[in-house]
Image (cartoon, grey):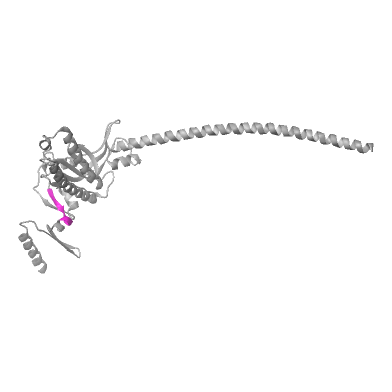
Amino acid sequence: MIENQNASDARIAELQIKIEDLEADFEQAERQNEVLENICFGLEQEHNKAQTKLLDAYEQISEKNKMLEGLSAKLSKYLSPQVFESIFSGKQEVRIASQRKKLTIFFSDIVGFTETTENLEAEELSNLLNHYLTEMSKIILEHGGTIDKYVGDAIIAFFGDPETRGVKEDARTCVNMAIAMQRRLRELQSEWLEMGLEKPFEIRIGINTGFCTVGNFGSADRMDYTIIGNEVNLAARLESLAEVGGILMTHGTHSLVKDTIMAEECDTMTLKGFAKAVRTYRVVGLYGDLVEQGRVIQVEQDGVRVMVDMKTGNKSAALQAIKEVLSQLED
C-alpha cells in the first residue's frame, strides 16, 4: 500500500514538473509572440510610411508629367508638327547639323499688305492677320507640309523633310496645297467683305523644287530648323513675280506635276543672282477640277490621253490641232 502511495506521489511530482515546464514554455512563447507582434507592428508602420512616400512620389511624378505635357503642348506651338514629333520621339537630335535634300519650297505673301491694312486699328489688324495665318496653316498641315516660319504676312513652307513621300509626290502635294489655299482665300474674301474690310487680302505664291540644305542652324543655345540655298531664294523671287491671286512655279516643279496639274508657260525670266534664265509656269488648276468645270475636255483610252483647253479663243485652234493629229494618224 505504501509502495503504491509512493509511486503515486512520484507520478504527481513528475506531472507537476511537466506542468511547470509547460507553463515556462508558454510564458516564453507569449514573450516571443509579444516580440513578434512588436516586430509586425513596426513592419506595418514602416510599410505604411513607405506606401505614403510612394503615393507622394506618384503624385509628384503625375504633377511633373502634367507640367511636362503642358510645356510640351506650348513648345509645339513654336515648331512644325513634323519637327516637333521627330525631336520628341528621338528620331532627330537637337544639335547643329544639316543635310542636302531635294525639296519643294513654298513662298506666299499678301499683296499690298500695308496699303490694305493702313486704315485698320492694331487690334483689328492682329485679329485679321492671325485669322488668315491660322486658316492657311491648317491647309499646310492637312497636306503634310513643314511650316518653316512666318515673316510678317509671308509664309514659308516646304515638302520633303523631315518626312517625304517621294520627290514627285511632294511636289504634287505642294501645288495641290497652293490651289487649296487660293480657293479657301476666296471664301475668306467674301467673309471679310461682309465684315466691312474694303480690300480683302489677296496672295501670290511661288513654288520651286531643287536641292537645299535643311537642318538646325544657329548656336548651341539657340537653333532654328530651316532651309537655305539658291533654290530657296528662287522660290522667294518667283513669289514676288507671281500675279495677284496666282501661283508661279519653276520648270523643275512643273516637270513633276504636269500630268495632274494644268499650267501655262510664261516668259523665260533672267533673274539677278541666277546665271541661267528661269523657265516659269502659271498654275491654271487641277485637271480633274477643270474637266468638271467644262474648261478642259479630256479623253483617255488604252494609255492614250487627249486633253483640250476650252478657254475662249482656243476652240478653233483645238479643232485644227485635232484635225492635224487625225490626218497624221491616218497617213
Q: Residue furthest right?
A: 1
Which of the pair 140/52 is nearer the observer? 52
Q: Is residue 326 left or right of residue 16?
A: left
Q: Is residue 159 above or below residue 33?
A: below
- Residue 30 falls in which quadrant of the image? top right
Q: Which residues are magenta?
A: 280-289
**Total tally of numbered discs in the picture:** 0
Q: Is residue 286 left or right of residue 219?
A: left
Q: Quadrant of the C terminus?
A: bottom left
Is any atom of residue 148 visible in this view?
A: yes
Q: Is residue 170 left or right of residue 276?
A: right
Which of the pair 95/137 is nearer the observer? 137
Give x and y (percent) for residue 306.
14, 62
Give x and y (percent) for residue 291.
15, 58
Give x and y (percent) for residue 58.
45, 35
Question: Could you tell me which residue is drawn at 10 percent across and 69 percent down?
Answer: 330
Per the picture, the main secondary structure of the magenta-coloured stretch is: strand
Which of the pair 315/196 is nearer the observer? 196
Is any atom of residue 202 visible in this view?
A: no
Q: Magenta segment: does it hold 213?
A: no
Q: Is residue 131 left or right of residue 90?
A: left
Question: Could you tell me which residue is drawn at 51 percent across and 35 percent down?
Answer: 51
Question: Could you tell me which residue is drawn at 94 percent across and 38 percent down?
Answer: 1
Q: Residue furthest bottom?
A: 330
Give x and y (percent) for residue 74.
30, 36
